[in-house]
Image (spheres, coloured by chain):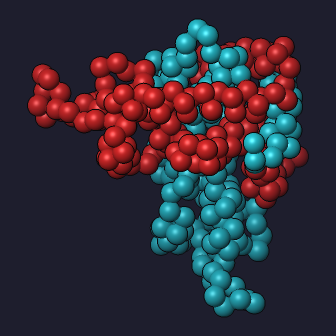
Chain colours: A red, B cyan
Amino acid sequence: MILPAAIDPETRLQGEDHDALRLWLRLFTCTTMVERKVDGMLKRECGSSLPRFDLLAQLYRAEDGLRMGELSERILTTNGNVTWLVAALEREGLVRRRTAPHDRRAVVVRLTAAGRRQFTAMARAHEALIIKLFAGLTATERHSLHALLGTAKQHLRHLRDTP
Amino acid sequence: MILPAAIDPETRLQGEDHDALRLWLRLFTCTTMVERKVDGMLKRECGSSLPRFDLLAQLYRAEDGLRMGELSERILTTNGNVTWLVAALEREGLVRRRTAPHDRRAVVVRLTAAGRRQFTAMARAHEALIIKLFAGLTATERHSLHALLGTAKQHLRHLRDTP
């Protein structure tokens, strides 16, 4: 997909804007471009989507499953209705909902064996695409970018929520 | 806001993952952290939100207003219901909907004078926060990061949608 100039947020910038603002809009644009390409590929090749992939990825890492509340908190790609998504994935046999062993009011979601298989296949396609998307940078440039973003992230992590 | 480790997508990574995947997850994490902080500030200090700010920003740049369809396309931060958002902003007197002059079936949305004033105030608060959020990097580092993301973006732009 080529983003039309009109929907590239960087086109909003005017000459006098602060360099941090330019940086943020470029960061945001790159992230959005990658997200759209990943979502498009998951839809085309796996009959899935980025929110579904993200949800399955969270469950794949959680051997004992996750409570609905934990799952909602961990889904970063969307504010979409996690309950609705889990119900759809359960109908397809990819996840299973059960009452929590020590708290009968809580519902725990787990991947099924079919869900693990499907996630593994999607994760391979996802990794291959990501490698292609970042192939415009040399290994050294990817390393520098990773390090610079690490510095930015460290600062973000330690800022307080209040002004 | 400090992201709990559990919802930092980088914690999902395992040792053998390709460096492009690590880079993508870090990029995604940084973007999400900034988005959450901006959204939180806009809610706390301006009684607004990131989707509202983004919508007002699009209209601010478009002197002649935008059709509903154009506006939906340009909103990158959310898939939320643009129609609903526009209706809410119109009730608050920040935007106005009119029939398009040469196409009576199309609706054009414009900022009102009050909308322009409110957006300008929000844009100042937004810029001040972005400067603070990226202050963990020196000016030289911000410049390098901007340039590396530019290379990445150039490649993303020229990739075709098909495999």
Q: Is residue A49 visible?
A: no
Q: Is residue A47 above or below residue B82?
A: above
Q: Is residue B29 visible?
A: yes
Q: How many marks?
A: 0
Q: What residue lies at 65% left-to-right and 19% top-to-bottom? A: B22
| Left or right for A20, reference B110 | right
Quadrant of res A62 = top left
Q: Is residue A155 above or below residue B56?
A: above
Q: Is residue A60 above or below residue B115?
A: above
Q: What residue lies at 82% left-to-right and 16% top-to-bottom? A: A139
Q: Quadrant of the C terminus of chain B?
A: top right
Q: Nearer the viewer, residue B116 or A45?
A: A45
Q: Is residue A64 above or below residue B157?
A: above
Which percent across, then down, holds residue A122?
Answer: 55, 33
| Left or right for B84, reference A35 | left
Quadrant of res B150 = top right
Q: Nearer the viewer, residue B76 or B133?
A: B76
Which percent across, then down, holds residue B124?
Answer: 67, 45
Q: What residue lies at 81% left-to-right and 27% top-to-bottom? A: A135
Q: What residue lies at 36% left-to-right and 45% top-to-bottom? A: A92
